[in-house]
Image: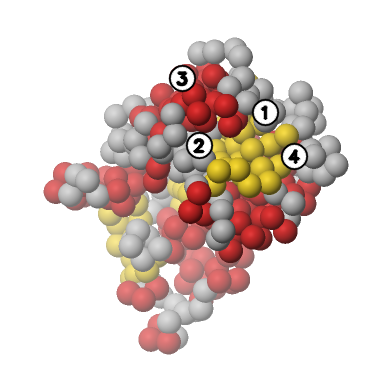
Amino acid sequence: MTASSILVLGAGELGMAVLRELAALAAPNTPRIAVLLRPASVQSPAAQTLRALGVELLVGDLQHDSQSTLAALFSPFTTVICCTGFAAGPGTQTKLARAAIEGGVQRYVPWQFGVDYDVIGRGSPQDTFDEQLDVRDLLRGQQGTQWLIISTGMFTSFLFEPSFGVVDLAQNSVHALGDWDTAVTVTTPADIGRLTALIVLAEPTLSNQVVYTAGDTLTYGQLADIVDAVLGVTLNRQRWSVPTLLADLAQNPDDNLRKYRAVFAQGNGVAWDRAVTFNAQQHIAVTSVEQWIRQRLTAPATSR
């Protein structure tokens, strides 16, 4: 199988990164690269950018279109890559996988850009993860459509999102989720886009497997040390233990950020050795956390 035609679902931060890299790397072996957008997005600036890259625009609604309607949209493509996450609502990821199978897609790359759901298992603090396991079970339980799962860890930038609460420079603070020796794997969206394109276009074809990437794998203690050293600050360090985060979630059971904190604090399936990753095995340079900080951050004036 060669990826002679590729459809990407969604053109958000990750979808745009994947599409840019596919457009740069795929020709001439992949003459058709397309993206599925909602009708309201077809005239957006992002859509204009994609047209300029030679990406074909298709119209569809992943949330509201029926499985059969989506299957008909998917069927002309060799490979379909889902870059639309949980925002489309519960059940959407399962519907998309079923549509890929119904449409006879040769290879489907589901939205699994994140943690290792097999290791985390069912019943985790983040209840949306159970659907990710439903998708894996569905794909593994059939033979008509090959599948490819790309596990990337957390977006690097999420470590520095104040609302998530790991590194909050404005508050001069850093929190360990679980403990200071709990590890986390992260990759930037730009690196995910490039690596996804390379993985999808790899020869011989990769399929029916989980492929890992990592811009970095580090503990929260190492993260705090790096931030202090690079920015010349001394962050206030506080540990959020698993019982503390689970109790906090119990008081706010519908809060997604609290669900994610609890999952990452448990440390299962959220970090892997960089040696097992596609980028390490192929000697592909990626952005470490230290490099990301140097490129993106400056210390607040009050911390200097």
SS for callout 3: helix
SS at circle 1: loop
Q: Position of residue 184 (x, y in %)?
A: 47, 48
- Secondary structure, mark 2, is loop
Which of marks 2 and 3 precedes in the sequence?
Answer: 2
Please, what is the three-letter code of the amino acid marked with disc 2?
Gln
Residue found at the far left of this picture: 251
Q: Nearer the viewer, mark 1 or mark 3?
A: 1
Q: Specify the color scheme.
A: secondary structure
* Amino acid type, label 3: Asp
Q: Residues within 10 Å of mark 4 (few under 14, many from 20)?
A: some
Task: Determine which residue is flagged by label 2.
Answer: 112
Look at the image and tell me whether residue 68 can be seen: yes
Percent from the top left, x then y, of residue 178? 33, 48
**Spatial separation of the CA atoms under disc 2 and disc 1:** 23 Å
Residue 212 in the image: above or below residue 222: above
Q: Quadrant of the C terminus?
A: bottom left
* Amino acid residing under circle 4: Arg
Identify which residue, 214 or 2, lies in the foreground: 2
In the picture of the structure, the residue carrying the numbered disc 3 is 137
Marked residue nearer the N-terminal end (1 or 4):
4
